[in-house]
Amino acid sequence: MTEPIDPELLSRLRDPELDPATRSGLISSIAESSPTAVGTLYEMLYRRCRRQQRGTELAEAALAELRAKIDAFREPAIGAVFLGIQSRDGGGATGSEVRARVIHGNTMRLVDVDDDVDAGSLVLGRTVYLNSDLSRIVDLDPDRPIGQLVTFEAFAGAGRDRAVVKAQGEETVARLGPDVASLPLSRGDSLLWVRPAGVVTEKIEAVPSESTDFIESIPDVTFDDIGGLEAPIARIRHRLTLRVRRPDLAERYALPRGGSILLVGKPGNGKTMIAKAIANELREITGSSRVRFVDVKPSALHSSWYSESERAYRRLFERARDESRRDPSTPIVIFMDEIDGVGRARGSSVNGVTDRVLLALAAELDGMSGNENIIVVAATNRREDLDPALVRPGRLGDLVIDIPPPDRRGAERILAKVLAPLPCVSERDESGESVREEFGERLVSRLFGSSADRELATINLRDGTSRRVSSSDLISGAMLRNLVARAAERASIREIEGASAGLRIEDLVIAAAEELESAASVLTPSNCATYVDGLPPDVPVVRVDRPASFLREPIRYRGIA
């Protein structure tokens, strides 16, 4: 009969914290005190060792699996684009036999899906990662896909799974992802195209552009804000009325309804203000709640990379046409200032870049026909440098408007508008509308007088002749506005220092002298023709002489005390 083991000793023996030496001593003690219990003791120890052995085997297997996964993660994951699911027999069933169609580079592959990858997250166009031998999807890209921005043209065929999209002027057929195919799509919508897979994955909502090629602004200038240019403004208003409000009259009288206006005039005479006023005039004529004024600097579109300049112009006008189709009720005015920077006559460029850009611009202007809500306004001070093909009707020659510098009457009107909100005070401490009129008349009398002290420079020509430059040669609308701003600043500083308040005539006279001296200082033999009219075109300027500073004493207007 087997003798039972002392429960206290057995409990101590089962203690996992017991050190080996103590455990060995307990086993010896049990064997000595209960020889018949040795068999039971050895059987218990055998079962314990077997359990530990199985635990060790399981731990080693788990460790090996973990090491394999770690090694797999250490291998470089290779990106691909998911296209679809199919079973090993070629069907569309899912389950343990599922395989995935992916495209890596230009090669389509059929790969396995790792058990740790959520098959439900595999959608058309999703970026996935393959193992090093390109045989298994091991992970998913957590970020949203990136790609090329294209515009929707139309659905391809009867279904909604494919579409014709346009990228950089070229059309292609792309597959639509499930998230896009279920959305309402119209021509001109922006889509995200994953080019390697040929899949559209997302519809991009339109955001106001702040790129250099399509800068939109809301002009706050109207024709009523422009003084001294009544005749050019009247011609522009008549053309806008015929084009937008009364197209029936234009058709009845066989009048051109071209959508371009070329403004020609010296710098500072209001070409930019007129372009902004055209935008506001179109808004009033059409009754639209807004207008798009796109201020384009041709020089900003030029690139040193081959064909990039031409592409920039194509992108600009393509964007304008897309916006016109999207919202035909909103007028679009594309203002291209300093058009002579890109429209110079062919053959004047040494490397031929300007010629290619000119041809691209001319082609885009030809493509603007039929877009009734788009007006192209260009401005230049060097019409003679423009290529004849650019200024013909149908491009920029539909309506050519000369913007002259202000004469005496025009200068008085400009000054009346600029001085209207300012606190003008006469030498008799009088104020009001009559004082502002007096200031304008006295200042104009000084600027347009004929006495010798108004001569600012002498232009010497190669044939020995010379041409004196007077203040009336350099007057512009921008100069008059800046002149008044200088005078107002001078008056405000005087008031800060505790002296008399209000804008006085001496402020205007001193500001006029400073403005004229500044204008005369920029005259050089190479730019005299830009600022001074009447110079012979075939005789070059060799020198510009400047006399002493312009006289600053106030000159009273005749008939005013």
Image (spheres, rainbow, N blue to C red):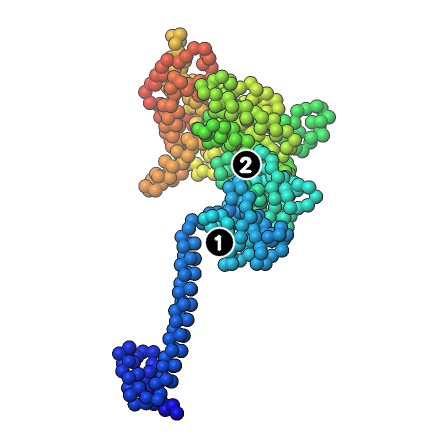
Image point 71% across, 24% down: which residue? 253
Return the mark for residue 138: 1
| Closer to us: 419 or 457 | 457
Q: Is residue 478 visible?
A: no
Image spot of residue 94 (x, y percent)? 60, 57
Return the mark for residue 426: none
Left or right, residue 12 beside residue 363: left
| Residue kind at label 1, given as amino acid type | Val
Image spot of residue 554 (x, y percent)? 38, 27
Left or right, residue 545 beside residue 259: left
Reply above or below: 163 against 509. below
Mark 1 or mark 2, earlier in chain: 1
Q: Nearer the viewer, mark 1 or mark 2?
A: 1
Q: Which corner quadrant holds the C terminus?
A: top left
Task: Look at mark 2 in the image and give the residue it sits on.
Answer: 293
Name, please, the residue furthest toward the top.
463
| Closer to us: 176 or 500 | 176
Dot 1 and dot 2 residues touching (CB under 8 Å): no
Reply above or below: 337 against 449. below
User: Gap between marks 1 and 2, in whole Å?
Assistant: 51 Å
| Residue kind at label 2, given as amino acid type | Phe
Image spot of residue 234 (x, y percent)? 60, 27
Image point 33% across, 18% down: which residue? 547
| Closer to us: 206 or 423 | 206
Image point 43% across, 61% down: which residue? 65
Tell me the crowding category of disc 2: few under 14, some 14 to 19, or many 20 or more residues within 10 angstroms, Cα based: many
- Where on the picture, by quarter, is residue 331? top right
Q: Is residue 20 visible?
A: yes
